Image (cartoon, coloured by chain):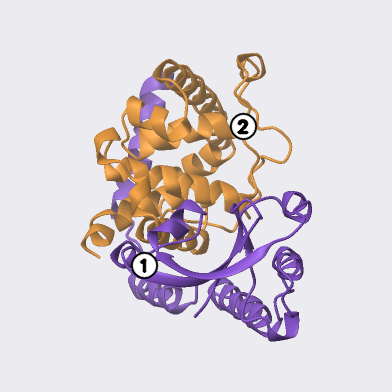
Chain colours: A purple, B orange
Amino acid sequence: MNSPAPDAFLDSRLAAVRAELDAVRAPAQLEGALAAHFRRSQNRPPRLWWMPPLALAATLAIVSWMIRTPLPPMPQAAQVAALAGGNPSQDPGPFLALKPLERIALEPSTTVVETEFPRALLAEWGLPVAPDRAGEPVRAEMLYSPDGEALAVRLIH
Amino acid sequence: MALYRRHKDAVYRFALLYCGSAAGASDVTQDTFMHFITRPEQFDATRGRIGAWLCGVARMIARKQLGEREQPTDPALLADDTAPLPGQVDHESPLDHVLRTEAAEQVRREVARLAPHYRDVLILCELSGLSYAEAAQVCGIDIGTVRSRLSRARSALAQRLARYHGVAKEAV
């Protein structure tokens, strides 16, 4: 008896495997195992679950530290106050320099004048002004040079 | 679950051919569907059937489980015969018997002994019913390469089976 042609022989063998495979079914318990596995994976905390609490704790620690640590006195304000001849211990608030400190220091004499001006003027000095309160007057002490040039300002609350 | 019930048998059969054991095939099937459940966005319906995509996932998982290294894609290396490289040899026990009839089981064993790049296309195209295009997509190769690998795989398998067939005839 002659052996079958290679292709036909192989095809018949492969067809036999396919026929056998057609009868193969996935085990019934696999569906239950898959469902249980899926439930477990759903209940498992995410891999980086510790990141949000850690970030929150770090934020709280930083904010707490910032609140507890007193801000260092503003050297500019202290110098301006000194230049203005005020007593730091009785100083109601810092002066805000409107001119460079070196320039203020060169002034032979200065004058502090209590005044009132529109709040909008603060914006010109780079201070924040709420638009809805821009028209309100502000009380302040101005430090003037002998020429009448505004050197520094201190808001009075 | 409807999708699982529709495709579980095909994926399991594919995994069975890859792993050579029912336990391994169950693990691969479960992991394949878990992969789909957890990363459904990876399947692009415009690029092919979900059945073929699941076979691709199962192949990837089975290869990982078998610790098989990626097959060479250099044509010069593939110009060699279909013998598997060291480390790519199927280590299944002779007692593993996943198909009922001896003839079918013999073919399965010989398929398992082919080099992975030939075994892949043979399992996908001849035994899992994927088209050449789908097999090309699963293996990440072009259709021409699928055709040539399939031709060499069939040739190698035919030779191996003929050898056994001859031995059996002589024994009779």
Q: Relative to A149, does residue B133 appear above or below in the rendering? A: above
Which of the pair B17/B103 is nearer the observer? B17
Name the residue carrying label 2.
Answer: B71
As drawn, the residue found furthest toward the front would be A146
* SS category of the residue bearing label 1: loop
Q: Is residue B43 left or right of residue B75?
A: left
Q: Residue at x 74, y 54 (%)?
A: A101
Which of the pair B148/A46 is nearer the observer? A46
Name the residue carrying label 1.
Answer: A27
Q: Residue at x 65, y 14 (%)?
A: B76
Q: Residue at x 29, y 34 (%)?
A: B47
Whole-percent x, y for residue B25 in the image: 47, 58
How many circles with numbers are drawn on the protein?
2
Name the disc covering residue B25, or none. none
Q: For the residue marked with disc 2, what is the amino acid? A: Gln
Please tell me if label 1 and label 2 are on a single chain: no
Q: Residue at x 29, y 65 (%)?
A: A132
Whole-percent x, y for residue A23 in the image: 29, 54
Q: Residues within 10 Å of mark 2 (few under 14, many from 20)?
A: some
